[in-house]
Amino acid sequence: MSISKIFARQIFDSRGNPTVEVDLWTHKGRHRASVPSGASTGAHEAVELRDEDKNAYMGKGVSKAVHNINDIISRELIKSGLKVTQQKEIDEFLIKLDGTPNKAKLGANAIVGVSMAVAIAGAAEQGLPLYQHIASLANVPPPYILPCPSLNVINGGRHAGNKLPIQELMIVPTGASSFQEAMKFATETYQTLKKVIKEKYGLDATNVGDEGGFAPSISTGEEALDLLQDAIKRAGYTDKVKIAFDAASSEFFQDGKYNLDFKSTKPDPKKLLTGKQLADLYLSYVKKYPIVMIEDPFDQDDWEAWESFTKKSTFEVTGDDLLVTNPKRIKTAVDKKACNALLLKVNQIGTITESIQAAQMAKSAGWGVMVSHRFGETENTFISDLVVGLGVGQIKTGAPARSERVAKYNNLLRIEESLITTGEKPIYAGIKGFSKGNSAPTLSKN
């Protein structure tokens, strides 16, 4: 039950950048976790420790974080005698060992790797599936909920070389009756979208990006949304597959305005919008297209725009860069009524315990919660167990393409199958996992 050894190494994520992998040993054997990394990161996230050596890996090496695990965390955590089933105590120990408010000393990428490995070991110690162990940590009783996936199928923003300002456009199979059926709807719509894009923009436009989505040569949200709506209709899933998007607006917020032409060398002045003008543009999309969620519609510190927009919303308004999975920022957003959903990324805050606390705080406020991958991913499937364990009913982890993305969906299929096989009756969240304006998600668990 006690930890006998911890060893970390540098591996590579799905973008070919270094990241951290942690092996943790108990008498049950080795337990492994690997750490994802973001591309568009919030200014308020916990600190991802990089080497900053421009002569190696473009400055993105993680040997400092690896050193901190192997030479500091390993020694101190083993010396503490804490057991792997004591997740909260271990996470608190790691936070205290770091001693900074944003995990800048040891690195959030070091701390979260160890925290995840501890959770995996804790599940093994008790002979439980990881999702069941996480549910126990979070005090979430059965029946287990399988999440509605939001699959990123068209890329723009910092994720693509086109001029589309919106970073991710997603298909959301809300009308399915099970996770397995949801993936049927999603994959068929994805393949249909590929045909639609090929017909309109040529074969080159169907090459996929780092999250498996397409990046055709388009420049406006309307063009992208028209493509999705056409694909959904042609796939036969009108009313069963909805649309969501991540604007990632902090990426194009410049001098108090939103530059929708930020990737041009000579931006069009007509595409420089105020927060109110941008809000009106989003609302025009909602009137025309079946949109159930908008993520990061405004800059991470433009609280006034968030508050005004959420007040008018009849859909889910999700905070990512605004909240960075940080309980303090979540509380501020709850008090200000700045959004109605949390995008939960474990590596933004740095420990499993803090992630659970963030989810609980959001759910208590009547918000939706969407567990999310990062732009730079690994084959690790931790978040698919996390979303079931937390019972929050939403996940986004890329397109149904590229193995590091599909691995999460495949693990959810296995979880659903195992629950059914053992006689349990898992619930597919569908649209019930999403908040709608002032209305909380209608999932049975709060």
Image: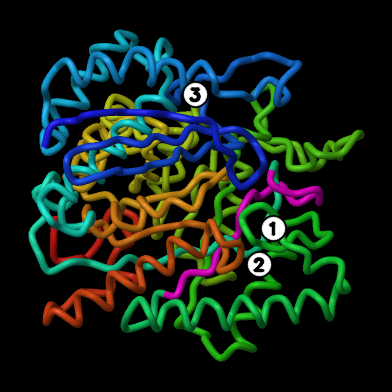
Closer to us: 361 or 387: 387
Q: Pointer 3: residues within 10 angstroms few (<14), some, or many (20+)?
A: many
- Amino acid, disc 3: Glu
Contact flag, marks 3 and 2 (Cβ < 8 Å): no
Return the residue found at the far right. Answer: 266
- Amino acid, disc 1: Gly
Report the residue marked by disc 2.
225
Rendered location of residue 74, percent (x, y):
30, 20
Mark sitting earlier along the chain (3/1): 3
Left-right relation of 410 to 140: right
Asked if the magenta segment contains residue 161, the reply would be yes
Report the residue marked by disc 3.
48
Mark sitting earlier along the chain (3/2): 3
Q: Residue at left 31%, top 28%?
A: 6
Q: Pointer 1: residues within 10 angstroms few (<14), some, or many (20+)?
A: many
Q: Residue at left 29%, top 56%?
A: 385
Contact flag, marks 2 and 1 (Cβ < 8 Å): yes
Contact flag, marks 3 and 1 (Cβ < 8 Å): no
Report the residue marked by disc 1.
221
Left-right relation of 314 to 208: left
Which span of residues is magenta-colored? 159-173
**Quarter residue 16 falls in:** top right
Cα separation, mark 2 vs mark 1, equals: 6 Å
Cα separation, mark 3 vs mark 1, equals: 32 Å
Closer to us: 358 or 126: 126
Helix, strand or loop at mark 1: helix
Rendered location of residue 250, percent (x, y):
59, 33
User: The N terminus is located in which quarter?
Assistant: top left
Cα separation, mark 3 vs mark 2, equals: 34 Å
